[in-house]
Image (cartoon, rainbow, N blue to C red):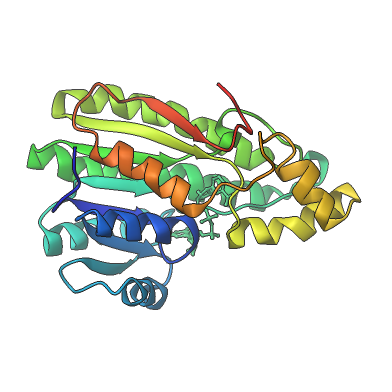
Amino acid sequence: MTVQDKVAVVTGAARGIGKEIARTLMHAGAKVVIADLNIADAEACAAELDATDTQAMGVAMDVADEAQVDTGIATAAEKFGGIDILVSNAGIQTVAPMEDFDFAAWKKLLAIHLDGAFLTSRAALRHMFKQGRGGSIILMGSVHSKEASVLKAPYVTAKHGLIGLAKVIAKEGAAHKVRANVVCPGFVRTPLVDKQIPEQAKALGISEDDVIKNVMLKHTVDGEFTTVEDVAQAVLFFASFGSNALTGQSLVVSHGWYMQ
Ligand code: NAD
């Protein structure tokens, strides 16, 4: 039940939830690969985490680009000696009503969330199966893997889809002791959510305060945002769990926004 000396790739790790996951896994003893669109951002994140060269490395990777994913994962495996943990976390949000939703925006969101999870999982699995020392794949879902909200058609579609993908990986990975699980956070104050507040206020014709109180937090048990630390602890739990007993599952971390 430890991630000590394991190699963990975290996508979308230059900021927000991914950055905190990288920090938490590194402090728990893992070697962390900080993968993001821009190498300068990934390396700045490693510097901010005070990581040494043997604790973390930055990798440039657009998760929707097959060649960049395969090369990035291979580079990381070569430098750190394999891949043990993948946290497929990179994501974006675009809000609009169905009838106005731009097709290109729909496809872009699905590509980052679904193609990204598929491509990074496939690349990581190839290394894990070859290494023969097991592994843990963690996909970043959302309360929107379980429930819908207005204005979020592609996001809700993609986040539901990740649960199916994790279940397939759990079944195919079992013989190799590779587990796959989904972490499903409620609203977390990151740039992804900050950007949505004025957009939702405009689309719904309400104030930004009302978006926070009556859209984002209304269904929580205590009116509180989930934190990046809360999400990172859930990821650490899945990453460090040592057997196939915990696989194909999804864990909601949302202050009760969604109860299973
Ligand atoms: P964020 O916008 O703060 O950070 C996202 C990171 O992903 C950025 O560093 C960005 O550069 C990177 N990224 C975007 N597109 C990429 C691509 N194509 N390839 C590689 N990297 C890319 O977002 P966040 O709030 O930290 O969200 C992280 C994940 O958590 C997402 O999957 C999101 O859907 C999920 N999530 C967030 C919340 C929330 O309330 N913030 C809630 C539930 C789930």
Kindly give the residue lying farthest to the right in the view shown: 205
Q: Position of residue 70 (x, y in %)?
A: 27, 54
User: If the image is split into quadrants, where does the C terminus sit?
Assistant: top right
Looking at the image, can residue 118 be seen? no
**Total residue callouts:** 0
Q: Position of residue 255 (x, y in %)?
A: 59, 37
Quadrant hosting residue 250? top left
**Observer-nearest of 163 and 197:** 197
Q: Would residue 259 appear left or right of 126 to someone viewing this image? A: right
Looking at the image, can residue 210 be seen? yes
Residue displayed at 71% across by 56% down: 196
User: If the image is split into quadrants, where does the N terminus sit?
Assistant: top left
Q: Position of residue 45 (x, y in %)?
A: 38, 72
Q: Would residue 87 appear left or right of 149 to someone viewing this image? A: left
Residue displayed at 42% across by 66% down: 14
Residue 254, placed above or below residue 106: above
Q: Position of residue 76 (x, y in %)?
A: 20, 61
